Amino acid sequence: MNRSLTRNIISAARRTPDSTEPFTHLVEVEHLFPATAFADAPARWTPGEGFTEVAGGAWLRVNADGTRTAVVTGVGPKELPAADDGTWTGEEVWTVTSADPGVFTWLGDKPHRITRALGREDAEIVREPYEGHPAEAGETYWYSFGLKHGFTPVQRADGRYSLTLACAPNASWWNGPWRLVSASGRILKAHGGRAVVRTVTGAHLSATPATVDRMRLLSLI
């Protein structure tokens, strides 16, 4: 066990104020992996310039004409016709352009609801097979990685990877700081890099999706 990491996490947890709201004060550990980590991962695919990834496998771009374009990879078969109007049996890549912002409101949560755009006169849809698509190799790699290791790192703008875990000391010490110590220690031992410990406060934290994801991820590692 990394004694410095343990000491910093426990020290940060002890400094968090008491609160009747358990998730208003968090201890976070940001893991920064070495540049050589995950060197065998396939090159990351993106739809192109101007797109912002709003969820795993879902990107959004605001176009010059006021429309928006979403690209969603790995859209699973639904009770809908396939792109060739036959039976839809394989995953697809959908590119949807529309002037209605409401078409894209769910992208950050349930991106595969992109299929609701089918049949709308105000939506332009391009459908491609997911099998063999450039996005498939990377997404398959990270899906398998997540199953094996219990987490998937985030690739930063500089190309390196990071992972942030969080706990709420006021919620539970044994299921909070000590679980964070254990998970962070295992990640450092297995993948190297360094860890930065910090405290985050604010009543809004309990409602943010990022915080919920970090807490959920900690429980899985």
Image (spheres, rainbow, N blue to C red):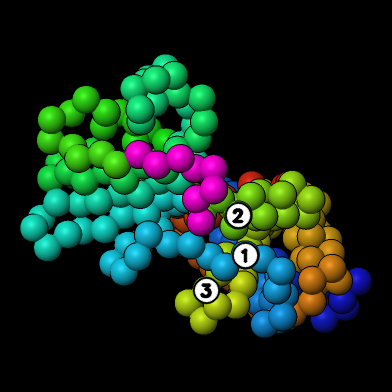
Left of 7 or right of it: where is 201? left
Query: In the rendered image, which quarter is residue 115 located in?
Result: top left
Amino acid on which the number 3 mark rests in the picture: Arg
Say whether marks 1 and 2 touch (CB < 8 Å): yes
Lower sequence index among marks 1 and 2: 1
Query: In the rendered image, which quarter is residue 26 located in?
Result: bottom right
The 10 Å Cα crowd at callout 2, few under 14, some 14 to 19, many 20 or more, is some
Q: Looking at the image, which residue is at 35% across and 49% down? A: 71
Q: Is residue 88 above or below residue 163?
A: above
Name the residue carrying label 3. 156
Lower sequence index among marks 1 and 3: 1
The 10 Å Cα crowd at callout 1, few under 14, some 14 to 19, many 20 or more, is some
Residue 137 bears which disc, if any?
2
Q: Is residue 42 visible?
A: yes
Q: Residue furthest left?
A: 65
Horizontal and vertical percent for residue 101? Answer: 19, 44
Name the residue carrying label 1. 42
Say whether marks 1 and 3 touch (CB < 8 Å): no
Q: Nearer the viewer, mark 3 or mark 2?
A: 2
Horizontal and vertical percent for residue 100? Answer: 15, 41
Q: Nearer the viewer, mark 1 or mark 3?
A: 1
Amino acid on which the number 2 mark rests in the picture: Ala
Quadrant containing the N terminus in the rendered view: bottom right
